[in-house]
Amino acid sequence: MTRFIFITGGVVSSLGKGLTTAALGALLQARGYKVRLRKLDPYLNVDPGTMSPFEHGEVFVTDDGAETDLDLGHYERFTGVAAKKTDSISSGKIYSNVLDKERKGDYLGKTIQVIPHVTDEIKKFIEIGEKEVDFMLCEIGGTVGDIEGLPFFEAIRQFSQEKGVGSCIFMHLTLVPYIQTSGELKTKPTQHSVKELRSIGLSPDILVCRAKDRIPNEEKKKLALFCNVKPEAIISAYDLNSIYDAPLAFHRECLDIAVLNAFQLDTEKKLDLSIWKGVSKNINFPEGEVRIAIVGKYTKLGDAYKSIAEALTHGGFANNTKVIAEWIDSEIFEKENTASYLQNFSAILVPGGFGERGAEGKIMAAKFAREKKVPFFGICLGMQMAVVEAARNLAKIKNASSEEFHYPYSKDKKEIVPIIFHLEKWLDQGKIITRKFTDYKGGTMRLGSYDAVLIPRSKVSEIYNAKTISERHRHRFEVDISYKEILEKKGFIFSGLSPDGSLPEIIEIPDHPWFIGVQFHPELKSKPFSPHPLFSDFIKAALKQSRLV
């Protein structure tokens, strides 16, 4: 029988529901259970694909091409279970599905209402693939009391009633603030949050209480009394040195025991936490450190590059090294000297992004890395800007640029030479996909996993130790393959191509300590217990460089 755990939040957002869900999934796996983790987001966007990173943070992409919330990245990194399209849903998608059915006449003339039609659609989503796992963990985005979330709360209330006793439990994450002036932990916000939850028919079985430090037993007893939750089901979620300490920390707090007790399951079942003990050792006892410059345009919000930051950390684990990543706004280089910012770093990474803002700064960073022989990793737009830099400064194509930016960069206003062009056609599992520049933006990019064929004896073929790889994509612009010969004469190698040879996937410079650009997003597949090979080798190169800096 599949058991469902619904994770809700209260008081304020960004307390760590996604991390808590992921850590709990890892603990249940450590006891031999099969898990799947899902995110239900109340916002009205169909998906986060068209949302600015400043609005929503990173967009995480699945193998099957879904653009999802960044919490699915946590789910994958902690459990190793590859997320699917069926693991992420929003209010926008739910309402879209309901309205599509109404237009088709599927409701046979009925008046369409939130209850039962919207809530039924949510319940159908929750139970997809339920027979494949032992536990289904469903995180509800936002906080209790949000008007957008009410259909989701009502749906999970109905769902638990329909599934019956012993099938579902509710876990509520709240804030227990510390008031400095009075020297007290305040439980009242949690009490009010639980009261709000109970007013819509949901009673938490487990309370996870976010605080700076462990919550004392007296406060736990108080919360248990006023929130009608067993004292042993009050769990502290306190500050940690690393998010990867969370599984061990939650186990010490007996979160997994509380869940098993709520389902009346055997708590003595074998538990293997060796993977997480190994990860914790890597975190807390590194033998060295390197400084990496991340030159991007969304540097004011760390969540915009969440997977890249984590993948760099994983690369450090592979080399028993602490990675100090420093974020540099690429626009700075358009006004100030590049070298003054980058000369003391062991490596440079230029991540993906959209639009022309900050693009020239990324080009300057690529030029600095190429000329100064500093390890360079360009991802998606980062790769494209490295190619534009080479076209301008090595191949002497003065006005080389990207169609994405719409206007020439040259001072004399000549037409640009589009080294990077809008992707109009590609092959997806034997089917030709076509796109126009004027198409709707949502869901129209090249999304999900695609194969790439690696050139023998190239650096990337050695790193991957493979001839063909599969990586996740999210882009609508591409390096023009017709410039391959010109750039290869100037020292570049197109070391990875799509199986039909039409789309450049990887570029590298053989005569350089480490200069690689990839069109895909390798960071999306990296995990603390299985670092991505490109990030592992990149940090290895940075370590060598650090001895020269």
Image (cartoon, grey):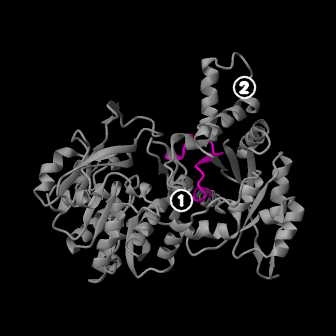
Q: Which residues are magenta?
A: 28-50
Count the marks. Answer: 2
Left or right of residue 227, residue 274 in this image: left
Q: Is residue 301 visible?
A: no
Amino acid type shown at disc 2:
Ile
Left or right of residue 500, residue 60 in this image: right
Q: Is residue 490 magenta?
A: no
Q: Quadrant of residue 481?
A: top left
Q: Is residue 30 magenta?
A: yes
Q: Is residue 510 visible?
A: yes
Residue displayed at 14% across by 58% down: 396
* Quarter of the figure that contains the N terminus: top right
Task: Name the residue carrying label 1.
Answer: 78
Q: Quadrant of residue 247?
A: bottom right
Q: Quadrant of residue 65?
A: top left
Task: Name the residue nearer the viewer: 409 or 505.
Answer: 505
Amino acid type shown at disc 1:
Phe
* Quarter of the figure that contains the C terminus: bottom left
Residue displayed at 19% across by 52% down: 455
Give whichever of discs 1 and 2 has the lower sequence position. 1
Q: Position of residue 53 (x, y in %)?
A: 51, 55
Residue 112, which numbered label? 2
Classify mark 1: helix, strand or loop: helix
Residue displayed at 60% across by 19% down: 104
Q: Position of residue 271 (x, y in %)?
A: 61, 62
